[in-house]
């Protein structure tokens, strides 16, 4: 557990670091193309920020050689493997993004060449794309939502670049009012990409480059919005997929009951059962969920869900925790509707029950008298588990009851590995038989 906790702390730190890198990479992706098109070198604060960004990127390179990714953390890779994997993948793009070319060449007055080389620093923006899988896991958003967020992020970035390209083609980059020129170019880009162009800003029909550039912007816009609509459709489908499956299951049962002309009171009871199943469990079956988990997780899930229930049973008092852990895995969830008979007087029983939610009544043989009510956290049927003999009472569900059952075969299989407890059970059985004989 300490190792797992440490891995989680490392993953959290890496996540925050990746966010910081993404913010700085986004800044460069906006700033460098603007400087390249407008021929305005970074000065004062912007130059300081650019140099700070380079320092952070250099630090990132050093860290990546030693710090594993979340996937490598869980795989337990050695530092040599981590360094080699990084060297083969992101080292070159990260190195190009870290070099402050503008500082080297601006010192000798060659600004144009410096800014052209600075375009290599945009490689870092592709690093952001590699964070998507990790962020999906960390933030725990729907995959369609994360894809949509990343797509909109890159679309906005692309529209910024597209607007700067239009400024260059239209020679708007020499306008003394650069901000106004940029807003105008961005306006053209937005109306063109969204395919709602108003016709107030159009390409010069005599200039092939402007026509081709506009066609490219229009095709990009059409594809982009097609992708957005498809993702929104997928998102809406996935949000409701569990409820849809539950409704389909209810409809199948409903159609079956209609075809067999089931009585109305039985149909109503079935409908109430499925409504309760949805409101309390969202349609999930605990047994199915647990069966899909690896064995180690099944133990931990079962321990978390049922440990308190088992510990309340007197015969399990002071039992070996390892044995309790094994027994928990064999507990089977079951659900009973109001009025259902869980056990019937005289039936041969081979399982006991633990009440997770709800309450049950202990009835007389004829079912007319209520001897007791067992509520949440209680248990019953332990005699059947020990002796496998006829039930001495009828047990009826008061309302909807979430129970866990443990059958004798599973119980005997577990205690066979714990001779001390098995001897304890045999003593209990002998005492019960002696009491019944008297």
Image (cartoon, helix red, strand yellow):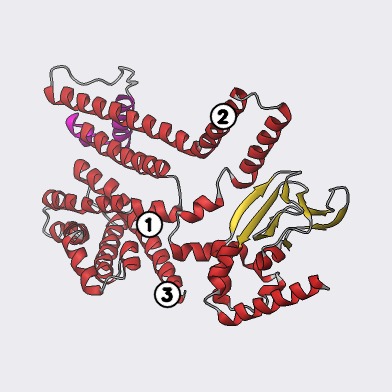
What residue sits right under mark 2 in the picture?
251
Closer to the chain start, of discs 2 and 1, is 1
Q: Which residue is mark 3?
A: 3
Contact (Cβ within 8 Å) of mark 3 with mark 1: no
Mark 2–mark 1 Cα distance, whole angstroms, equals: 46 Å
Indicate whether 205 appears above or below 163: above
Residue 204: percent from the left, percent from the top?
18, 19
**Figure quadrant of residue 220:** top left
Which mark, residue 420? none
- Decide: few, some or many residues near mark 2? Use Cα within 10 Å; few <14, some 14-19, many ≥20: few
Which segment did they paint magenta? 167-194
Residue 144: image location, x then y, percent: 40, 41
Q: Earlier in the sequence, mark 2 or mark 3?
A: 3
Tell me the residue at 39%/53% (across/down). 135
Which residue is at a point 18% across and 27% down the rendered structure image?
Answer: 213
Quadrant, the C terminus? bottom right
Q: Is residue 351 above or below residue 214?
A: below
Q: Residue furthest right?
A: 369
* SS class, disc 1: helix
- Number of residues whose C-alpha sits closer than 10 Å to that of mark 1, classed few (under 14), some (14–19) or many (20 or more): some
For discs 2 and 1, the disc positioned in front in the rendered view: 2
Residue found farthest to the front: 437
Q: Can residue 137 be seen here?
A: yes
In contact (CB < 8 Å): disc 2 and disc 3:
no
Q: CA distance from mark 3 to mark 1?
A: 25 Å
Specify the quadrant of the image occupied by residue 257.
Answer: top right
Mark toward the start of the polypeptide (3 vs 1): 3
Which of the numbered marks, if any, corresponds to residue 19? 1
Tell me if mark 3 has few (under 14), some (14-19) or many (20+) residues whose alpha carbon lies within 10 angstroms of its own: few
């Amino acid at each position: 557990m300490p190792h797992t906790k440490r891995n989680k702390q490392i993953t959290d730190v890496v996540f925050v670091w990746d966010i910081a890198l993404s913010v700085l990479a986004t800044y460069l992706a906006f700033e460098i193309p603007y400087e390249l098109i407008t021929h305005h070198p970074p000065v004062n604060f912007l130059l300081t920020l650019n140099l700070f960004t380079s320092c952070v990127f250099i630090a990132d390179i050093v860290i990546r050689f030693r710090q594993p990714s979340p996937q490598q953390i869980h795989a337990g890779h050695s530092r040599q493997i981590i360094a080699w994997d990084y060297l083969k993948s992101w080292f070159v793009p990260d190195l190009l993004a870290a070099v402050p070319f503008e500082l080297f060449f601006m010192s000798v007055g060659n600004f144009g060449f410096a800014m052209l080389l600075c375009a290599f620093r945009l490689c870092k923006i592709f690093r952001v794309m590699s964070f998507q899988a990790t962020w999906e896991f960390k933030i725990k958003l729907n995959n369609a939502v994360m894809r949509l967020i990343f797509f909109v992020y890159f679309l906005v970035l692309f529209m910024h670049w597209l607007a700067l390209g239009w400024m260059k083609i239209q020679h708007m980059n020499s306008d003394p009012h650069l901000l106004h020129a940029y807003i105008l170019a961005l306006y053209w880009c937005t109306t063109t990409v969204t395919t709602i162009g108003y016709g107030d800003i159009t390409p010069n029909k005599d200039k092939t480059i402007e026509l081709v550039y506009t066609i490219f912007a229009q095709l990009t816009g059409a594809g982009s919005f097609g992708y957005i609509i498809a993702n929104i459709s997928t998102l809406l489908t996935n949000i409701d997929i569990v409820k849809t499956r539950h409704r389909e299951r209810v409809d199948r049962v409903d159609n079956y009951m209609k075809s067999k002309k089931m009585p109305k009171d039985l149909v109503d009871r079935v409908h109430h059962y499925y409504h309760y199943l949805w409101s309390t469990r969202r349609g999930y079956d605990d047994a199915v969920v647990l069966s899909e988990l690896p064995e180690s997780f099944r133990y931990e899930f079962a321990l978390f869900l049922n440990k308190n229930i088992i510990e309340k049973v007197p015969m399990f008092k002071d039992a070996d925790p390892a044995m309790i852990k094994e027994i928990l895995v064999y507990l089977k969830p079951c659900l009973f509707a109001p009025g259902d008979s869980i056990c019937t007087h005289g039936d041969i029983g081979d399982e006991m029950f633990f009440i997770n939610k709800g309450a049950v009544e202990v009835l007389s043989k004829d079912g007319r008298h209520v001897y007791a009510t067992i509520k949440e956290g209680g248990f019953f049927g332990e005699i059947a588990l020990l002796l496998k003999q006829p039930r001495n009472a009828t047990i009826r569900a008061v309302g909807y009851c979430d129970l866990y059952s443990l059958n004798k075969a599973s119980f005997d299989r577990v205690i066979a590995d714990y001779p001390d407890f098995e001897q304890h059970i045999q003593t209990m059985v002998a005492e019960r038989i002696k009491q019944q004989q008297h």
